[in-house]
């Protein structure tokens, strides 16, 4: 069978261990591409904190315009200790999310074969859910400011922006995802007993949207007890949807419950396909281990699997996940953070070899 046109992937290793794990993600994509006849064109750029220190910008002024017509963005990590986080994130990651209307952040929380949950007695049957996070508005808006800096009466104001359009579309994404799942259940994260305007509005829109999905079961919890339930009852959850802040919190807690935030993937999705979606591991740049060749590439590789699924290659995506699980079940081929003996490249190479079969 002849190869289809190559998928154009904007590739941004970024900072720290991103530079080590992205090549392994690309290695695995090329291996699964040979197996399933999928071609890739990787357009790699060096946008990073180092770029910022040299040029005063995390990326060129026309950077996003260059990638607007690509099929996806494959990102490693953003951030380094000598560049403030609000500079690095708002200079690269957040502009990509917002310019490309990636209003859904999707993170699977699943206990993979070969991993162990920190929760006693929990198995893969107990931990298998998604967190759907609203990704472009909510608590992480740019509205606000500071007055009287450095003075005794200094004021800091941060506005949370919730629009009906923004809330409804992420809720509908969560319900549509639940329709594809065996359990068919959606949990909403709220805090309407303490946050008097935005959270009651969120609750009202959740009630309105769920009326269109009578076959989907639902539940609703305040964020504080919901975090407790993640730890005590992970088996209760299937699809969990939350605002930008609550989704951010839950989508770190979920992977921790599933064994390790170090292997957690994520997708920043533009569901309509008008712009490229972006796929990245959750772990960040990890300056403490950068350059040592010991970073776990699983989060990046799992993100690559999510990218394949999004781009219409579910069988290839499933093959990557199966290969990942095969490799991390063997201590010789998983990395040291998971009790193994392999370095970053050895782990990536082992997954590629399983796919080559």
Image: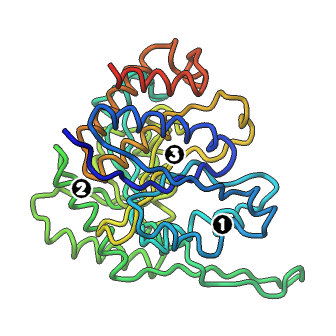
- Whether residue 240 can be seen here: yes
Q: Which numbered disc covers residue 122?
A: none
Identify the residue at horizontal 60%, vertical 84% (top origin).
Answer: 143
Circle 1 sits in a helix, a strand or a loop, which is it? loop
Q: Nearer the viewer, mark 3 or mark 1?
A: 1
Specify which label sits upstream in the sequence, 2 or 1: 1
- Whether residue 190 can be seen here: no
Q: Nearer the viewer, mark 2 or mark 1?
A: 1
Q: Is residue 305 above or below residue 47?
A: above
Residue in the foreground of this view, choosing between 226 and 177 = 177
Which percent across, then down, holds residue 265?
A: 45, 44
Which percent across, then down, holds residue 100?
A: 44, 71
Give the residue pinned by disc 3.
Answer: 281
Q: How is the image coloured?
A: rainbow
Specify which label sits upstream in the sequence, 3 or 2: 2
Give the residue pinned by disc 2.
Answer: 177
Identify the residue at horizontal 78%, vertical 67% (top origin).
Answer: 55
Q: CA distance from mark 3 to mark 1?
A: 20 Å
Q: CA distance from mark 3 to mark 2?
A: 21 Å
Which percent across, then down, holds residue 139?
A: 53, 73
Residue in the foreground of this view, choosing between 181 and 65 = 65
Specify which label sits upstream in the sequence, 3 or 1: 1
* Residue that protrudes farthest toward the bottom in the picture: 147
Q: Residues within 10 Å of mark 2 (few under 14, many from 20)?
A: some
Give the residue pinned by disc 1.
Answer: 59
Circle 2 sits in a helix, a strand or a loop, which is it? helix
Identify the image quadrant of residue 192.
Answer: bottom left
Identify the residue at horizontal 45%, vertical 82% (top origin).
Answer: 197
Circle 3 sits in a helix, a strand or a loop, which is it? strand
Q: Quadrant of the C terminus?
A: top left
């Amino acid at each position: 069978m002849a190869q289809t046109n190559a998928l154009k992937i904007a590739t941004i290793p970024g900072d720290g261990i991103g530079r080590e794990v992205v090549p392994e993600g690309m290695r695995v994509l090329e291996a699964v591409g040979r197996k399933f006849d999928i071609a890739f064109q990787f357009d790699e750029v060096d946008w990073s904190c180092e770029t910022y220190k040299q040029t005063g910008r995390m990326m060129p002024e026309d950077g996003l315009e260059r990638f607007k017509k690509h099929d996806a963005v494959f990102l490693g990590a953003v951030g380094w200790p000598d560049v403030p986080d609000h500079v690095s994130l708002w200079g690269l990651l957040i502009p990509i999310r917002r310019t490309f209307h990636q209003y859904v952040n999707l993170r699977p929380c699943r206990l993979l074969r070969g991993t162990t949950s920190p929760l006693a007695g929990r198995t893969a049957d107990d931990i298998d859910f998604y967190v759907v996070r609203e990704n472009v508005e909510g608590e992480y808006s740019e509205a606000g400011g500071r007055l009287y800096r450095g003075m005794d009466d200094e004021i800091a104001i941060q506005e949370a922006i919730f629009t009906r359009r923004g809330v409804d579309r992420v809720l509908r994404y969560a319900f549509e995802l639940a329709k594809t799942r065996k359990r068919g259940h959606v949990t909403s994260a709220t805090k309407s007993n303490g946050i008097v305007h935005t959270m009651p509005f969120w609750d009202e829109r959740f009630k309105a949207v769920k009326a269109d999905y009578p076959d989907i079961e639902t539940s609703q919890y305040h964020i504080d007890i919901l975090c407790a339930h993640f730890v005590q009852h992970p088996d209760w959850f299937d699809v969990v949807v939350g605002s930008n802040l609550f989704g951010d919190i839950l989508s770190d807690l979920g992977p921790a419950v599933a064994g390790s935030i170090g292997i957690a993937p994520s997708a920043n999705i533009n569901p309509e396909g008008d712009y490229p979606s972006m796929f990245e591991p959750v772990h960040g740049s990890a300056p403490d281990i950068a350059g040592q060749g010991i970073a776990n590439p699983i989060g990046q590789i799992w993100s690559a699997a999510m990218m394949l699924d999004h781009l219409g290659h579910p069988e290839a995506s499933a093959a990557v996940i199966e290969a990942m699980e095969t490799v991390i079940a063997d201590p010789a081929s998983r990395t040291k953070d998971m009790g193994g003996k392999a370095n970053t490249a050895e782990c990536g190479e082992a997954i590629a070899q399983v796919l080559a079969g």
